[in-house]
Amino acid sequence: METVLVTGASGLLGHKLTNMLLEKGYRVIGLYYSHEIPLNSNNLIKVRVDLRDRVKLEDLILKTKPDVIVHAAAYTDVDGCEVNRLDAWTINVEATRSIVRAARITKSYLLYISTDYVFDGEKGSYREDDVPAPVNYYGLTKLVAEELVRASDLLYTIVRPSAIYGVGVGKKNFAVFVAETLAKGGRVKALVDQYVSPTLNTLLAMSLLEIIELRPMGTLHVAGERMSRYDFAVKIARILNLPVENIEKARLSEFKWKAKRPRDSSLDTSKARRLIRTRFYDNELALKMFAREWSEWRAR
Ligand SMILES: NC(=O)c1ccc[n+]([C@@H]2O[C@H](COP(=O)([O-])OP(=O)(O)OC[C@H]3O[C@@H](n4cnc5c(N)ncnc54)[C@H](OP(=O)(O)O)[C@@H]3O)[C@@H](O)[C@H]2O)c1
């Protein structure tokens, strides 16, 4: 039985992946910090580690010698990263450096979760070999971390998703925000001029399971179909039978964020589609899965 160490096991993606790894029979060492991992299993060891504690993080990897490390933790608050730059650098870059350093000794396979925000968003439908040029500090730290992984002599895969959504724990994401607000009778503003490739956490986690089995070396874009935030909000409303007329069209220029956002950070996923059986790119499937998970979640 292989052991997989998952950083960010309490997050939107990490908790899904941890659950699926346990179901597949892996032993999991799940790392968390400020939120509990909402899972229990004899094959799950939960460890509370602040990724800023380099010694503890490296020690844990050296002692547990995982076969696989999935590095899904990050300081994901894009505006927070813009102002708390030291934390952003320490959590997103230095912790990755520590993971690479320890993984070289334990000879673990490293699966690093990066982001579409490494791109400037001027072109859209980015391929893996397009040149990154982040427009905010979050994107910069994730890109530097990618380069640390790439420059190592590890067996690694870098996966770039986009606008991850889903129910459960972790980051309050756009889809859940739209669903909750409309369900309460509220109004939602959604951008007609920002394009992303919304990625359901469940389909992403299923794809990561395949990647862990295949261990393809290099970078892969694993994401949903390109659409504007507005179109995405409308699709969420339609699938949940919520009032579409309560979604207002908005433009990027109306929002005063601390960090600049890429205009079109959508991803071309043809390379990953040739490799992975999971239909991670199929928006209709993703929305149906989201609707089912959303109603199960609400019924709890
Ligand atoms: N969300 C998106 O739209 C998106 C899009 C593209 C790529 N990504 C990437 O996908 C990955 C997963 O994102 P997500 O949406 O699942 O994020 P998330 O829900 O915000 O979870 C972030 C995880 O990182 C952990 N973490 C943060 N700071 C930490 C620290 N100092 N020490 C230890 N753990 C720490 C959190 O632990 P606690 O909560 O327990 O503190 C949590 O488990 C990230 O690498 C992110 O950059 C996300």
Image (cartoon, grey):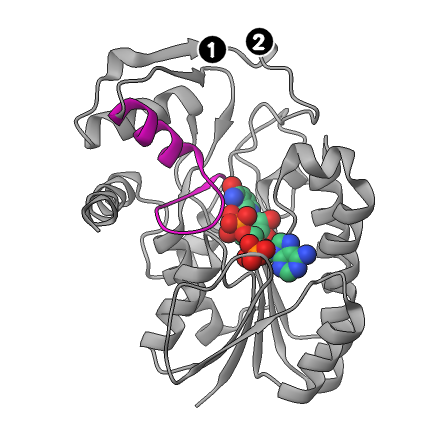
Is 235 contained in the magenta span?
A: no
Marks 2,1: beta carbons within 8 A: yes
On the image, numbered disc 1 is attached to which residue? Answer: 250
> Hey, which quadrant is residue 229 in on the image?
top left
Rendered location of residue 52, percent (x, y): 76, 61
Residue farthest toward the right in the current orientation of the protein: 86
Left or right of 282, for residue 217: right
Rendered location of residue 153, percent (x, y): 75, 74
On the image, numbered disc 2 is attached to which residue? Answer: 254
Left or right of 143, for residue 110: left
Element assignment for label 1: strand
The amino acid on which the numbered mark 2 sits, given as a three-letter code, is Glu
Instruction: Look at the image and give the residue range highlighted in magenta.
Output: 162-183
Q: What residue is drawn where x is 45% and y is 45%?
A: 223
Q: What residue is drawn where x is 57% and y is 74%?
A: 47
Is 166 contained in the magenta span?
A: yes
Vertical placement of residue 217 versus 116, above or below: below
Task: Mark 2 and ligand 1: say if the CB distance to the nearest ligand atom is below 8 Å.
Answer: no
